[in-house]
Amino acid sequence: MIKIQNLTAGYGKTIVLSHINLELKNETYGIIGPNGSGKTTLFRVLTNSLKLKSGHISKINGVCGYLPQKFGCMPLLTVKEQLQYFCYLKKIPVAEENEEICRVLRAVHMSELADVKCKKLSGGMVRRVGIAQAILGHPKLILFDEPTSALDPEMVKDVLEVIKELADTGMTIVIVTHEMGFAREVANRVIFMDDGRILESGDPKKFFANPKTQRAREFLSKVL
């Protein structure tokens, strides 16, 4: 479990996140909020690319997997070569590289495309490569920033199924999304953010049907 206690963070003198408290268990979380609510900044804190101004995050054991909102492949590399590059960045031993690449390609249903050049992949396939690189090295925590961004409905369905299968392996998965339906389908728990604070959280199926507070109802009216 990852504990976030009284976290405050921002850029320069600008405070973006204020007094965030969260406990992340081995579940799938959907973070929803309007632009500027602090979702991406929270991811930057969790990946250690942004320092806290105050507060505490319990140590994240092992590597952290991360799929940014804008993910691209090097067009002249094959899918396997692209993943070899990420293995190098994650310092995965060369002796384990081939087995690990085969594992993640199976997870995203792309084993037969290992030798295909990335320039020939569809947008949905590129997103699957992004998910594959995120799970290299058996991370305990995986962060997906808008994994269905700019995908057509059929591709969204494919990504949804892949993430559901990953969730069954007991990882902690945190997904930033604007898609209410996607959050409802994939998340065990939704977290609503606005103005750098957590407004509300709960079971998505129950919450969407019956928001618990007036603040939550006001929030939903902003983003639905």
Image (tube, rainbow, N blue to C red):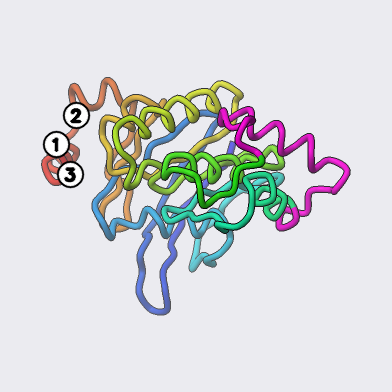
Q: Nearer the viewer, mark 1 or mark 3?
A: 3
Looking at the rendered structure, the kind of residue marked 2 is Pro
Q: Main secondary structure of the magenta part?
A: helix
Q: CA distance from mark 2 to mark 3?
A: 14 Å
- As drawn, 38 above or below 121: below
Which residue appears at 71% of the width and 33% of the height?
A: 102
Looking at the rendered structure, the kind of residue marked 3 is Val
Name the N-terminal-most of marks 1 and 2: 2
Name the N-terminal-most of marks 1 and 3: 1
The quarter holding residue 208 reads top left
In this rendered view, identify the residue nearer to me: 155 or 197: 155
Magenta segment, which residues? 88-114
Position in image of residue 74 (x %, y %): 57, 58
The quarter holding residue 175 reads top left
Are the two marked residues, 1 and 3, in contact with CB atoms closer than 8 angstroms?
no
Position in image of residue 220 (x %, y %): 16, 39
Looking at the rendered structure, the kind of residue marked 1 is Arg
Specify the label residue 223 is tagged with. 3
**Residue 23 appears in the rendering:** no
Q: Is 28 on the left-hand or right-hand side of 219?
A: right
Specify the label residue 217 is tagged with. 1
